[in-house]
Image (cartoon, grey):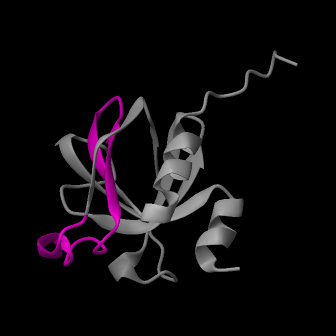
Amino acid sequence: MGRAERYQERNQVECGLRVVEGSVPGLGRRFKHGLATLGPRSITFVPFAGGVRLLRKRPVTFAVHDVDRSELRTVSAAQQLSARWGASIVIVHTGDGTLEWVVPPAQVIWATQQVLRRPVSPWRR
């Protein structure tokens, strides 16, 4: 079993995030790469310092209002210095801004489904 599959078992994915509109505290206009834990309608993102997995920075948690896969595209050769070439890019809408989310192509559908699921009410049985 590979690293991606082990992360997926824990609702996590290695990815990149950047703000394209508005602001999300802890994220900027340049891609940050790290590990995201996917919750219902939320992402907790731990950036890797300098892209090194063992050097983790302070986590950033934000609510997800929507994920737009309608304009799904891949990282181009021109973007490969800031994001992994061939990875998928989807748009994430938060209450404070709009993000580009770079996810491995094999995990993009799974990852977006995890984030878009509804939280389970503690009152429902």
Q: Residue drawn at (16%, 70%), measured in percent from left and top?
A: 79
Image height of 24 relative to 89, above or below: above
Image height of 11 relative to 84, above or below: above
Could you tell me if residue 59 is visible in this image?
no
Q: Nearer the viewer, residue 94 or 117?
A: 117
Name the quadrant of the C terminus.
Answer: top right
Q: Residue drawn at (18%, 56%), measured in percent from left and top?
A: 29
Name the quadrant of the N terminus.
Answer: bottom right
- Identify the image quadrant of residue 15: bottom left
Q: x%, y% of residue 11? A: 64, 55
In the image, residue 94 lies in the stretch drawn in magenta: yes
Q: Residue drawn at (20%, 62%), measured in percent from left and top?
A: 30
In the image, residue 98 lies in the stretch drawn in magenta: yes
Q: x%, y% of residue 73? A: 26, 54
- Identify the image quadrant of residue 32: bottom left
Q: x%, y% of residue 5? A: 65, 70
Image height of 94 relative to 82, above or below: above
Q: Which residue lies furthest to the top in this view?
A: 123
Horizontal arrangement in the rendering, residue 38 relative to residue 53 (left or right): right
Residue range highlighted in magenta: 75-100
Horizontal arrangement in the rendering, residue 53 relative to residue 95 (left or right): right
